[in-house]
Amino acid sequence: MGCWKWFDSVLNEAGVKVNDKNRDKIDGVIHNYISKQSSYGRCSADWRKAKKEILENDVMKQELVEKLKTLI
């Protein structure tokens, strides 16, 4: 399962529609964001925990939305 499936609400807010052409790019943006944030101690490296932490933190959620908007 691609990590983008866990972030449907963030993708919708960013206006990104998942398709075969951008699926890998979306995975890359989300993976990079979580990896970077977990290395700073802002969220867990555990994907299930990270999803919850990001969705509950308006700043982090907005940061991810802005990164995903670059794919439009």
Image (tube, rainbow, N blue to C red):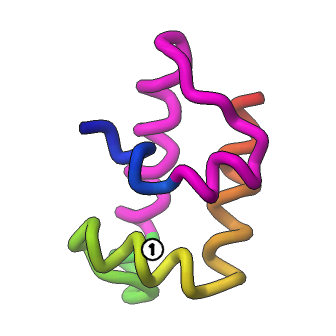
Q: Quadrant of the C terminus?
A: top right
Query: Which percent across, then down, holds residue 29?
Result: 51, 44
Q: Give 11 or 41, whichever is nearer the viewer.
A: 11
User: How far from the left and from the top, in percent, is residue 4?
Assistant: 44, 44
Q: Is residue 62 magenta?
A: no
Find disc 1 in the rendering and name its residue. 37
Q: Nearer the viewer, residue 33 or 40?
A: 33
> Helix, strand or loop at disc 1?
helix
**Front residue (pair 38, 7):** 7
Q: Position of residue 31 (x, y in %)?
A: 38, 50
43 over 35 or under it: above or below: below
Q: Measuring 35% from the left and 46% from the top, which residue is drawn there?
A: 3
Q: Is residue 36 left or right of residue 54?
A: left
- For image coordinates 47% across by 51% down, the residue present is 30
Residue at the spot x=63%, y=60% of the render?
Answer: 64
Q: Residue at x 56, y 86 (%)?
A: 56
Q: Residue furthest top?
A: 21
The magenta-colored residue range is: 8-36
Say if 72 sits above or below 27 in the image.
above
Helix, strand or loop: magenta stretch: helix
Q: Split into 4 quadrants, where in the image is the N terminus? A: top left
14 part of magenta stretch: yes
Vertical arrangement, residue 50 with respect to residue 36, above or below = below
